[in-house]
Amino acid sequence: MPLKSRLHLVGAIVCGAALAAGSQASAQTATDTLSVQVTVQNSCSVGGTTIDFGTYSSGQSSDLDADGNLTYSNCPAGTLTVSLDAGGSGNISDRQMSSGDGDKLSYQLFKNSARNQVWGADADGQQVVLLEAGSGEMMVYGRIEGNQDAPAGQYSDVVNITMNF
């Protein structure tokens, strides 16, 4: 091999070794860890019981009152707003139970024992402020007004509960 070719080959080898050494020197590595965590709590939930008025005599002059309750569980601190819809009547101001034969009997649900604050939806819902996460119950006060004529039978309605938290 001619001397000039050998010198080029040696030069190429030296340059390659220098480049390789330089790239190894600049490729440093550092490591550490990142912690990740979360606390999972049970979901806030709401449930209702049956408000059983017992027996109403058609045309009775007195009102018939009954109470029930709603429960809330595992809710975060803050304001809970519980709404009750109109049930089958579609009108919160005129809730009605119906019989299997389509007969109707008006009733109402209230937020207070004086039965003068109708329990409705949104702004007319009941609010509870929780200072810390927790569970509890809310009373629901029902009334069937007197002087309603209704055929004998079983009457019922289903009211949907919505809770915003």
Image: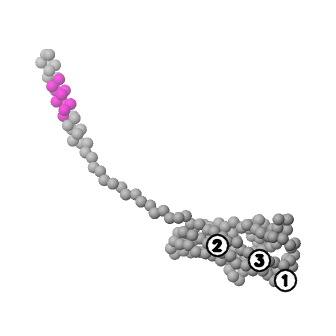
Amino acid carrying mark 3 in the image? Gly
Indicate which disc residue 70 carries. Answer: 2
For the point 29% across and 51% down, which residue is it? 31
Q: Which residue is mark 1?
A: 61
Indicate which disc residue 54 carries. Answer: 3
Relative to residue 141, is residue 23 depicted above or below?
above
The location of residue 73, given as percent across then percent down, is: 57, 70
Report crowding for label 2: few under 14, some 14 to 19, many 20 or more residues within 10 A (C-alpha). Answer: some
Instruction: Look at the image and tell me whether residue 123 can be seen.
Output: no
Relative to residue 92, is residue 10 depicted above or below?
above
Mark with earlier residue (1, 3): 3
The location of residue 7, given as percent across then percent down, is: 14, 22
Q: Nearer the viewer, residue 163 or 15?
A: 163
Q: Residue furthest left?
A: 3
Check residue 13 for magenta coloring.
yes
Q: Do residues under tags 1 and 3 come within 8 Å of each other at their CB atoms?
A: no
Q: Nearer the viewer, residue 158 or 123?
A: 158
Span of residues in magenta: 9-18
Q: Do residues under tags 3 and 2 come within 8 Å of each other at their CB atoms?
A: no
Q: Secondary structure at mark 3?
A: loop
Mark with earlier residue (3, 2): 3
| The quarter of the displayed image where residue 121 is located | bottom right
| The quarter of the displayed image where residue 26 is located | top left
For the point 81% across and 83% down, which residue is it? 62
Q: Nearer the viewer, residue 22 or 95?
A: 95
SS majority, magenta? helix
